């Protein structure tokens, strides 16, 4: 066989396990469908501008946490420094014009909200008490044990008693339990775009994991995401007998006698290895191999619905200092009103993006390092939730109508941003790029344009959400669904799988 390990997909989970296997001396080949590595963390170029496809800030970069651990084990941690976003407010939540800064330090955040809303002291206290308790238990283990067997409950009754209690709760279930008022429901779920679900649907355990992850520090790579990804990829390319082949999309996984016997790519090449690790979505992996080859235990792991897609604007701004208009070393979450459940329904069910929630990020204000745009220019990246199927069907049926609809929504969002945050924005736009969920499906091969793999509902967040060995003897799965979403989550999944393979 040509290789010891064949990695299908160069997303962050795939790059993580591939780089560690390569460093351990194994011959590793990575096959990637796109023309650049990194999955959603990849950076694309438009004239003099560089934009990261989906990632804007990350957590778990501190010593001993997953991102730092990977870089340290590869020996490149000094080459990829991270800067923390403003610890006094790394995220700003703006609801109907009222701004709240989310600081590092749960106690500080609780005090801020209590001072502003003293009449709601009791639900605020109960919320942060639960967040702290569940977060402490999650920090003891990398798993999210939200689906517990009777035996595991008995073994973990003390250690995970809070996690077990809230395992099947949504965030709204918890809000109802503590009688949280509408305005605070919106503020405390202000980072909802980081899981793309409203409080009614998102797993409370996942919400806690996100809140606690960013509470330990929100980070941006000093030299930008392209340098971060390239540094990891280079450790693979520079290892003896290892390679990354771009524009090699796997279109079939060959199975013989309960094992993977090789893979073929759309350009007609066939590759073989002793061991196969799929960074491709697990459902898609099963389709490539033939679902009938997988045992019942795998079939259970392959039943899930996807997270929704995003509508994105990538903007180059000239002659307008974003710092003078409420932006800085933080992100801004804009909500026109406090009913987040209705906002998501408007956007995903009624396809109404006339007055959506918006995530606004300014990477050129997160680090002083150049590399994203010409001198004197700045970058503004905007995202919100959208339904992939509508855009994909429109694009397939009528490409012109699809582009007209994209432009219509883009201009509406620009008008909204101009009226609310950046007067005269249209006059200062030097670059504008628009992407829908159909774009994500095309370039990143994300089924349904999903942003986070399986939707982060209580049913999809549990001990099963981790890398796993399939019922095919030499095939493993690892990605945002066979693991956890986000850069930290997928890197953590890659680290976990490497430990298991080398155990």
Image: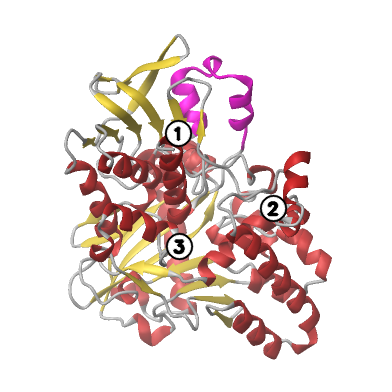
Q: Secondary structure at mark 2?
A: loop
Q: Secondary structure at mark 1?
A: helix
Which tag, 3 or 1, sits closer to the chain's start? 3
Residue 289 position within the rendered picture, expressed as x and y whole percent measured from the top left: 45, 19
Mark 1 — residue? 397
Mark 3 — residue? 60
Residue mark closest to the camera, 3 vs 1: 3
Q: Residue furthest top?
A: 257
Q: Residue at image x 47%, y 64%?
A: 412
Asked whether the residues under the numbered discs 2 and 1 touch, taking CB atoms below 8 Å apart as contact, a structural biologist would say no
Compared across the picture, whether 161 is left or right of 405 comes to: right
**Front position in the image: 71 or 378:** 71
Question: Does residue 196 lie above or below 390 as drawn?
Answer: below
Q: Which color mode does the image show?
A: secondary structure
Q: Secondary structure at mark 3?
A: loop
Mark 2 — residue? 201
Q: Quadrant of the N terminus?
A: top left
Residue 420 position within the rendered picture, expressed as x and y whole percent measured from the top left: 49, 78
């Amino acid at each position: 066989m040509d290789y010891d390990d064949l990695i299908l997909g160069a997303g962050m989970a795939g790059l993580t396990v591939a780089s560690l296997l390569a460093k351990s001396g194994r011959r590793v080949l990575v096959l990637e469908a796109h023309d650049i590595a990194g999955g959603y963390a990849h950076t694309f170029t438009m004239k003099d501008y560089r934009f990261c496809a989906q990632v804007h800030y990350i957590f778990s970069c501190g010593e001993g946490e997953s991102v730092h651990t990977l870089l340290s084990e590869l020996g490149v941690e000094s080459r990829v420094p991270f800067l923390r976003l403003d610890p006094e407010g790394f995220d700003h939540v703006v609801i109907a014009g009222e701004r709240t800064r989310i600081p590092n330090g749960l106690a500080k955040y609780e005090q801020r909200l209590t001072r502003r809303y003293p009449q709601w002291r009791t639900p605020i206290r109960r919320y942060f008490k639960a967040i702290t308790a569940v977060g402490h238990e999650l920090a003891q283990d990398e798993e999210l044990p939200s689906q517990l067997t009777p035996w595991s409950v008995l073994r973990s009754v003390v250690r995970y008693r809070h996690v077990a209690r809230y395992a099947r709760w949504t965030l709204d279930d918890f809000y109802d339990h503590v009688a949280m008022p509408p305005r605070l429901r919106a503020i405390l779920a202000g980072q909802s775009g980081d899981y793309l679900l409203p409080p009614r649907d998102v797993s409370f355990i996942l919400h806690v994991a996100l809140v606690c992850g960013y509470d330990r520090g929100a980070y941006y790579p000093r030299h930008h995401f392209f340098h971060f990804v390239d540094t990891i990829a280079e450790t693979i390319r520079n290892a003896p007998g290892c390679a990354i082949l771009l524009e090699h999309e796997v279109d079939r996984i060959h199975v013989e006698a309960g094992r993977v016997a090789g893979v073929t790519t759309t350009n007609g090449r066939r590759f073989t290895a002793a061991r196969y690790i799929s960074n491709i979505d697990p459902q898609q992996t099963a389709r490539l191999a033939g679902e009938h080859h997988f045992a019942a235990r795998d079939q259970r792991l392959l039943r899930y619905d996807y997270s929704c897609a995003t509508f994105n604007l990538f903007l180059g701004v000239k002659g307008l200092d974003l710092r003078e208009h409420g932006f800085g070393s933080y992100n801004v979450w804009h909500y026109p009103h406090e009913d987040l459940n209705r906002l998501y329904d408007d956007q995903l069910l009624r396809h109404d993006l006339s007055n959506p929630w918006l995530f606004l990020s300014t990477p050129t204000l997160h680090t002083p390092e150049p590399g994203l745009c010409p001198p004197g220019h700045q970058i503004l990246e905007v995202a919100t939730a959208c339904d992939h199927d509508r855009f994909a069907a429109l694009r397939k049926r009528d490409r012109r109508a699809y582009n007209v609809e994209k432009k219509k929504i883009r201009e509406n969002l620009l008008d909204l941003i101009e009226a609310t945050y950046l007067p005269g924005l249209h006059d200062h736009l030097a670059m504008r790029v628009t992407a829908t969920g159909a774009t994500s499906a095309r370039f990143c091969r994300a089924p349904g344009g999903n942003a986070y793999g399986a939707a982060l509902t209580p049913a999809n967040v549990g001990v099963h959400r981790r890398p796993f060995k399939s019922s095919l003897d030499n095939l493993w799965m690892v990605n945002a669904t066979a693991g956890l979403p986000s850069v930290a989550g997928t890197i953590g999944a890659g680290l976990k799988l490497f430990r298991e393979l080398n155990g």
